[in-house]
Amino acid sequence: MIGGLLVPYVVRRPGAALLGELVAAFVSMAIGTQWGIWTMASGLVQGVGAELVFGVARWRDFRGLEFSVKRPGLFGKSIAVPVWRAGSGAYLYGAAALAGLFSILLDTFLYTYYLTYTWGSILLAGILCVVGSVVLGGGLSQLLGEALAKTGVLSGLAISRGKVKRI
């Protein structure tokens, strides 16, 4: 999932989420996963899910959560806490959520989970998949993108031109 979130977070171009996710899926398939060619189907639906959300933002507003020092932590030391500001992070984390939802929907019907599990179990799996996608996919993509931008290797791209709030 990170391929479909990190690539558009850095380059901000139409199709970046789909291409990033398909490349990641191809690499996973090429090294020999148990799912074989179906890994590409998973990459396709995750990429399309992310691309839909980024398209709403017209591939421009990719700010993630903004971190600021707000309150003292243990032993009086200040800690950085995530602050969700209006409009901030909605697209990056929304793309992660929709990609996760599309992924669990594909798995439910492709692997016929509906024949094996109750709909309550599938719903719980869907919720966990979406939450995990937001936390791991969205969060890690933001952190990796910011870390790469700070090194200067992305100096020619939008992420390094001051359009992203630094952590």
Image: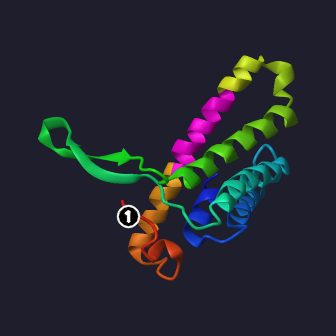
Q: In this view, does 103 lie to the left or right of 128?
A: right
Q: Is residue 131 magenta?
A: yes
Picture coordinates of residue 9, whole percent (x, y): 56, 64
Report the magenta stretch's main SS: helix
Q: What element carries label 1?
A: loop
Residue placed at 85% from the left, 51% from the top? 37
Q: Which residue lies furthest to the left in this view?
A: 76
Picture coordinates of residue 127, whole percent (x, y): 63, 30
Is residue 49 positioned above or below 159 on the image? above
Is residue 91 positioned above or below 97 on the image? below
Is residue 78 positioned above or below 126 on the image? below
* Quadrant into which the C terminus falls: bottom left
- Magenta range: 125-138
Q: Which residue lies furthest to the front in this view?
A: 86
Q: Which amino acid lies under the numbered mark 1 shown in the image of this protein?
A: Arg
Residue 30, picture quadrant: bottom right
Q: Which residue lies furthest to the bottom in this view?
A: 156
Picture coordinates of residue 139, whole percent (x, y): 49, 50
Residue placed at 53% from the left, 56% from the top? 141
Q: Is residue 75 magenta?
A: no
Q: Read off the residue under disc 1.
A: 166
Residue placed at 72% from the left, 60% from the top? 27
Q: Is residue 77 left or right of residue 28?
A: left
Query: How many badges with numbers are in the image?
Result: 1
Residue placed at 47% from the left, 54% from the top? 88
Picture coordinates of residue 67, whole percent (x, y): 35, 52
Q: Nearer the viewer, residue 87 or 23?
A: 87
